[in-house]
Image: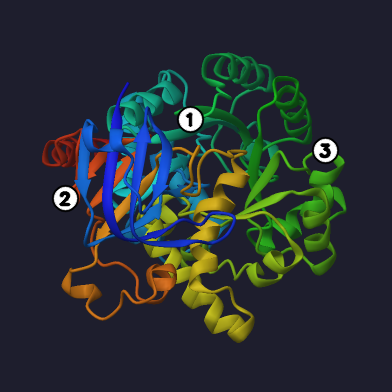
């Protein structure tokens, strides 16, 4: 049994059902869950195993990232792809990604997850879909990385079965047969599915996209996922090229195509969702099908602006995500929040979501996409996942009168002070608590050089 007391917080932004802001209040946690929040300190709290003096701290729920490609950490900021849009960008980078191995995936996962944690993220979903032959247990490498850092991690068994010769984009060496994919998907579900409250891991089935997988793989993946009660994820409506592809090949728009394969419903969420029409937005809301919004990636690849204000108004489940580091070049959900806020202010004016709406999108909204009721807010009975920011830092002088909107309107320059996952400190004074950052950086940079030279 372990206990944690966060004492006398200047402000706690709860993101709870009542949107409460608690001032000069305490949080007492036991065995990874919040037991008490309020101004009266429970007697047993004074004997807590760990006590944090938070008199000058702003406290927020841990951020939840709903779409990433951690392996792309080792192919970010490459000059040869900077001016490309999605299809050409993918074709160029697949020639690098086909050289992935266990060590590259483990180290890139450590780097990306570590950066997320330093910026207030406590749960990450990763969409891994590149499985070169003889590369080893890549999903196992990711879980090992997550455990060593202490982050809550949801993996996916991504997949591709259409290579260039089949009309897809990836090379032959990174696609697999449907039978291979389904067999390994079943293995990973049985190894990592965990529906317990407070679960530190989980698994999702996630064929890559309509232009790199067959309809049969999508259909069979949905059947397998639902037989085990796990969720489904893929890219959809990211570019006009994708729309043209499905219209030419299947005679229907991307959403209609996915609908024919059983890929709608509250257990499904799509990455991007930029090019839905109004009728499709209504269908997303009606079916409870979710969208992971990736504003920085969408801007960098010139893909477009998702209709987030309309989605939120209709009740479409929406979460926030950083997307792969090669299309974002960072793993910072705090930065994503501020860019998201500013982007929609620019394009939607007074109809745009508030900065606090964006915070809830990155917490409660993202938790909903992952099917998690135990994270995404601070209230008794929920997981003790949170981050703390010292309000006295120079960059926040005069900015802390409205803590709910602060992270979108002003933003945070530099790492958070403390990140806590399931009641355990994982970032302390802006540095990873469980890993030597300097040693990790050196190992990662050495691997990048050998990986890119292949």
299 left or right, relative to 309: left
The residue singled out by tag 2 in the image is 429
For the point 17% across and 42% down, the residue is 441
**Residue that badge 1 annotates:** 198
Residue 434 position in % (x across, y down): 20, 33
Seen from the viewer's position, the closer of residues 44 and 58 is 44
Position in image of residue 141 (x %, y %): 37, 24
Q: Measured along the vertical axis of the image, is residue 385 above or below residue 31?
A: below
Give the Cα distance between marks 2 and 1. 25 Å
Residue ID at (21%, 45%):
52
Q: Which mark is residue 148?
A: none
Q: Are marks 3 and 2 in contact (CB under 8 Å)?
A: no
The quarter of the image holding the C terminus is: top left
State which tag comes first along the sequence, 1 or 3.
1
Q: Nearer the viewer, mark 1 or mark 3?
A: 1
SS at badge 3 = loop
Label 1: which secondary element: loop
């Amino acid at each position: 049994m372990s206990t944690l007391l966060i004492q006398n917080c200047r402000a706690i932004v709860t993101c709870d059902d009542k949107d409460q802001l608690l001032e000069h209040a305490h949080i007492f946690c036991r065995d990874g869950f919040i037991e008490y929040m309020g101004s009266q300190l429970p007697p047993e709290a004074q004997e807590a195993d760990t006590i944090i003096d938070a008199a000058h701290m702003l406290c927020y729920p841990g951020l939840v990232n709903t779409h990433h490609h951690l392996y792309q950490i080792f192919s970010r900021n490459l000059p040869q792809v900077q001016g490309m849009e999605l299809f050409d960008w993918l074709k160029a980078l697949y020639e690098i990604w086909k050289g992935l191995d266990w060590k590259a995936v483990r180290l890139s996962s450590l780097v990306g997850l570590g950066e997320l944690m330093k910026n207030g993220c406590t749960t990450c979903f990763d969409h891994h879909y590149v499985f070169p032959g003889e590369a080893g247990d890549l999903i196992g490498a990711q879980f090992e990385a997550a455990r060593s850092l202490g982050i809550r991690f949801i993996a996916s068994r991504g997949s591709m079965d259409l290579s260039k010769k089949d009309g897809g984009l990836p090379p032959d060496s990174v696609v697999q047969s449907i039978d291979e994919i389904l067999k390994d998907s079943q293995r990973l579900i049985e190894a990592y599915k965990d529906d317990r409250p407070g679960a530190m891991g989980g698994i999702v089935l996630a064929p890559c996209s309509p232009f790199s997988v067959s309809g049969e793989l999508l259909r069979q993946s949905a059947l397998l996922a639902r037989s085990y009660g796990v969720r489904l994820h893929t890219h959809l409506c990211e570019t006009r090229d994708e729309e043209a592809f499905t219209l030419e090949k299947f005679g229907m728009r991307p959403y209609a195509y996915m609908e024919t394969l059983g890929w709608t419903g509250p257990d499904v969420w799509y990455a991007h969702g930029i090019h839905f029409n109004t009728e499709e937005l209504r269908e997303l809301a009606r079916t409870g099908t979710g969208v992971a919004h990736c504003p920085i990636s969408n801007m960098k690849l010139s893909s477009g602006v998702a209709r987030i204000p309309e989605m939120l108004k209709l009740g479409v489940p929406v979460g926030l995500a950083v997307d792969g580091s090669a299309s974002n070049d960072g793993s910072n959900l705090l930065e994503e929040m501020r860019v998201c806020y500013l982007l929609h202010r620019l394009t939607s004016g007074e109809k745009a979501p508030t900065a606090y709406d964006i915070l809830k999108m990155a917490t409660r909204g993202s938790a909903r996409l992952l099917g998690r009721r135990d994270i995404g807010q601070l209230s008794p009975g929920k997981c003790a996942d949170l981050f703390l920011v010292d309000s006295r830092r120079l960059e926040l002088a005069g900015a802390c009168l409205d803590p709910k909107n602060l992270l979108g309107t002003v933003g945070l320059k530099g790492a958070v002070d403390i990140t806590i996952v399931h009641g355990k400190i994982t970032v302390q004074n802006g540095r990873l608590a469980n890993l030597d950052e300097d040693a990790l950086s050196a190992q990662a940079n050495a691997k990048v050089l050998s990986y890119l030279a292949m």
